[in-house]
Image (cartoon, grey):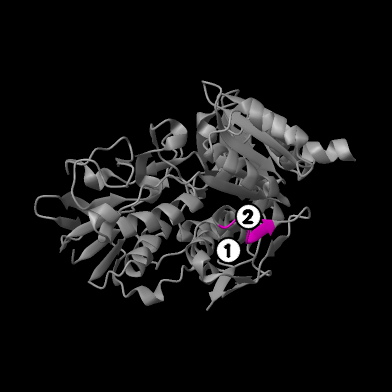
Amino acid sequence: MDPLVIVGASLAGARAARAARMAGYEGKLVMIGAEPHLPYTRPPLSKEILAGTKDASSCRIDIDDCEVDWRLGEPASGLDLDARQVALAGGETISFERLVIATGCRARRWVGAGGELRGVHVLRDLDHATGLAAALADGRRLVILGAGFLGCEAAASARSRGAAVTLVDTAPLPMPGVGDALGRRCAEMHHAHGVELQLGIGVVAIHGDEEGAVEAVELANGARLPADLVLVAIGAIPNTEWLAGSGLTLDPGVVCDAHLAAVGSAGVFCCGDVAAWPHPLAAGELVRLEHWTNAAEQGAVAGRNAVVAPADRVAYEAVPSFWSDQYDAKFQAVGLPRRARRMEVAETGPDGERFIVLGCDDRGRPVAALAFNGGRRLPWYRRMLDGGADRKAILAAVEADPKSFAGAAVVS
Amino acid sequence: MIKVHVDMNLCQSHGECVYAAADVFELGDDDVLRWKEEVDDDRRAELEEAVNVCPMAAIRLEG
């Protein structure tokens, strides 16, 4: 199985490397990374790095003892499964016996008018974060396109620096996909912290001045929002272009089986934001997740599966979890909220400052639980989801549980 | 026995360790993490999972 090549030097790739070593793999291990940096963790980028409370060195992922042969600063540009070679953009080819694909996603850019202007940023990589943090240093007017998790976190961080912040989204509430109760709470929170919310409206163009610097964001109703900086936070795109024509199935991530082996290959495994695999909570349908925890856990399983005997490979079926920190509030979720068709508040604390939302899919099966300042309740919900509990059973158990917020409210 | 250390200056109560090893780690009513400081050796796999899923890299095992 020598050498093992890991394409992608972020969290999933780093965890794959560690897991391969932990599983006893002692051969050559090559890691290819498009960025010049050693692996680093991304959650602080939109939080502490942007807020200026931590520096870049605090994001490093410890991988020193994994004996990695690094190829950094040059992306992979092609995969030849027959020759078992990865091509690099500079022309070099690297042979592999086993391959782990962990190329993640990149930020979706604004392709409308004004995307090229100076002062228009995206936020995905360390250099993006340090660049935007530096630009924010003297507290300027920031317009954020997209009020998803990233846009909301960046808004909170920028407010802490004194910037004037406007959040714009076509959706009627921030954090689309988490349900109305959480979305409303999120909107109230940003409003209370002085963020201007422009919701339910699209952006037409970004306008610049004569020197090519951003000046304003134009909305669909003709309003112009003055801006010194624009952050485009409209989602991410899987980095799979280098796999076009390789024979792997792209959808748009790399389609894998339950063991994270890429369909249509032998000895090729996949993990992190780029992997699409069948999940039990999705009734065996493919899911692709862009969460820290998924990259960490899935990376470890893919790295191990890549080097152990086929009979020792394990399926990856962890119940997903993720979080978002904004101001002093913590959103946490378990399961697959995107598959939920109905969201309902399952329990609320006496002061309304803590609550849990239960999400059920189109057949009424619980698929997600989301907490606002109520993370301590989520391990219980995660067990319920993992065990396939039905909605009525969960709601009845919440009512009867003295440890639930609902139970606590009744007791008090 | 395995000794479990958590750097409470780093912990942000994400609770990922609770998912990994529910009866070792627990978030209290105040959302502050509590944990057993000594755990049997046969729980090593769960503890290592807890170390790996901590977003803050706050957990360390000894022994």
Q: Quadrant of the N terminus of chain A?
A: bottom left
Quarter of the figure with residue A279? top left
Under mark 2, the amino acid is His
User: Nearest the camera: A108 or B42?
Assistant: B42
In the rendered view, would you say A105 is above or below A137? Answer: above
In the rendered view, would you say A131 is above or below A365? Answer: below
In the rendered structure, does residue A363 fall within the stretch colored magenta? no
Region of the chain picked out in magenta, as a range: B21-26
Same chain for labels 2 and 1? Say yes or no: yes
Quarter of the figure with residue A132? bottom right
Q: Position of residue A377 (x, y in %)?
A: 69, 45
Q: Position of residue A93 (x, y in %)?
A: 15, 61
Label 2 sits on a secondary structure element that is loop
User: Nearest the camera: A58 or A377?
Assistant: A377
Residue B56's disc number: 1
Residue tagged by mark 2? B14
**Residue at figure coordinates x 46%, y 67% from the top left:** A61
